[in-house]
Amino acid sequence: LYSIGTFYYSANDAIEAINIDDCLTDYISDSAGYLAISEPKVDKLISGFKLLNVSFVSIKFENANKVLFDAVYQHSL
């Protein structure tokens, strides 16, 4: 997903700039399968989620990367 690379390689101001009308926030928050990432950079993703105020509506636990899921849970995202 393009958004994952954005979190990995973009500065915070660039991430905020592409989040026009909260489009990225809403997309990620509504994507139940978003955490199905094979080798996530957990710190970068959590930082990006917090920056954009992501709040997952639902998560497909069976497909989610467990380390990333635990981090999302710990940060109440």
Image: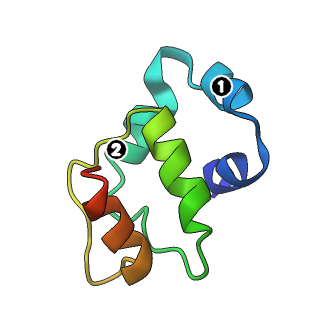
Q: Tell me which residue sits at (26%, 71%) in the image.
A: 60
Q: Is residue 65 visible?
A: no
Q: Is residue 29 above or below residue 1?
A: above
Alpha carbons under labels 2 and 1: distance apart: 16 Å
- The residue at the point 54 percent across, 66 percent down is 42
User: Do the numbered discs 2 and 1 sit on residues whose CB atoms are within 8 Å?
Assistant: no
- Residue 27 percent location from the top left of the image: 43, 40
Q: Secondary structure at mark 2?
A: helix
Observer-nearest of 29 and 67 = 67
74 left or right, relative to 1:
left
Q: Position of residue 10 (x, y in %)?
A: 76, 41
Is 71 located above or below residue 16 in the figure? below
Q: Secondary structure at mark 1?
A: helix
Label 2: few (<14), some or many (≥20) within 10 Å? many
Would you name the residue on which mark 1 appears?
18
Q: Amino acid at mark 2?
A: Ser
